[in-house]
Every structure is written in C-alpha cells, then in structure tokens.
Amino acid sequence: MTRAVFPGTFDPIHYGHIDIALRATQLFDELIVAVYDKPLKNLVFSPEERLELARKAFEGNPKISVMGFSSLIVEFCRQVNASVIVRGLRVFSDFEHEFRMAHANHRLAPEIEYLLLITSEETTFLSSTIVREIASLGGDVSSMVPPHVYKALRDHFETTNDGQDGRHVTSLRD
C-alpha cells in the first residue's frame, strides 16, 4: 500500500487544493492531507479550524484522511509511514520554490519521493492568499471554496471588523 502526504497550511482550503488531493487519490492507495500548524505567515484560521475545514471538504472519501503536523514534513512522513510528498503547481513561479523544497527534503530523507501535480486549468489562479484577500474585502469567493469554507470566511470577516484585524494579509507563499 502506498501512502502519500499532501502538506500545506490550507488557510483556507480551496478548490485548487481539493483538485490536487482528489487527483492524488487516483495515484495512491491513501492520501493524508497534512495541515501545518506553525507556518511563518499570518493566518485567518486557527490550526483546529483549518483541520475541521479540511476534514469537512473530504468527508466521505475513504482514501483521504486529514491530520495536523508541526514538525518537518519528512519527519511527519516517517511517523505516518508515507513514502511520497504530493504538492501542486499552479504557475511557473511555483516550480522554483517546489524544486528547492524537493531537493532539501530529499537531502533530509532520500527515501521519500516528491511528486508535483499541475493543477487543473480551472483552478490555476487560486491561492489561499487571493481567497483571503477577496473575502476580507467582502468579495464573493463562493466559486473558489466549498460552501462550508465560504461560510467560515464570511463569518470570520463579519466578526473581525471586515478583515481589518491584520491577520489575513501575507506576502509569503501558500
């Protein structure tokens, strides 16, 4: 049985993430969507909220489980006996970052493979940063995220002074 891990902050999870995860299940017996809880960027949702939003997005899919992690991704892979890290590529500029990450992870854990999937054309423009910014300004992100994520974003920004709490803006990669 081949187990793969799809790591990210998923703040919030969107249809681009879901596309990559579902396509990865066609290649592997099991996929763990791994929600990183200590990124070096500002977040909208807590680790617990991001885990719950991701779990709900994959509800009913027996090949996908969702877990949190706070270690190096290769250490997490070892802990859960995963042999592959899955990541998504949206645009060419993603490649450079993922290329460096793949080599760094390979240096740390040569037994773990790194697989990059190109996102579907419909979701190429999506990033959590874009979703957060549009939602924080009152824009409609209902075509970008599942309904439960849309509601969570709307509720969050309604209760945080229309997103003016400063937690949602980031210039770092997601």
Image (cartoon, grey):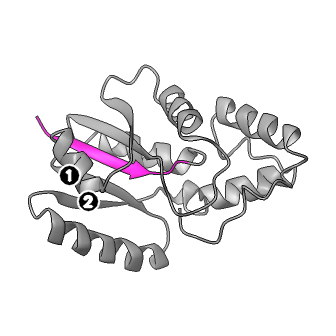
Q: Is residue 2 magenta?
A: yes
Amino acid type at mark 2? Leu
Judging depth in this view, the residue of 110 and 94 nearest the camera is 110
In the displayed structure, 164 sits above or below 47; it is: below
Residue tagged 2: 115
The tag earlier along the polypeptide, 2 or 1, is: 1
Judging depth in this view, the residue of 41 and 84 nearest the camera is 41
Spatial CA span between label 2 and label 1: 7 Å
Amino acid type at mark 1? Val
Q: Residue at x 48, y 42 (%)?
A: 18
Q: Residue at x 64, y 59 (%)?
A: 42
Locate residue 63: give its quadrant.
top left
Q: Is residue 80 magenta?
A: no
Magenta portion: prevailing SS class: strand
List x then y, in percent, for residue 35.
Answer: 44, 44
Query: Callout 1: helix, strand or loop?
Result: strand
In the displayed structure, 154 sits above or below 103; it is: above
Residue tagged 1: 84
Q: Residue at x 23, y 66 (%)?
A: 105
List x then y, in percent, for residue 29.
Answer: 20, 34
Find the magenta span and give its range: 1-10
List x then y, in percent, for residue 148.
Answer: 66, 29
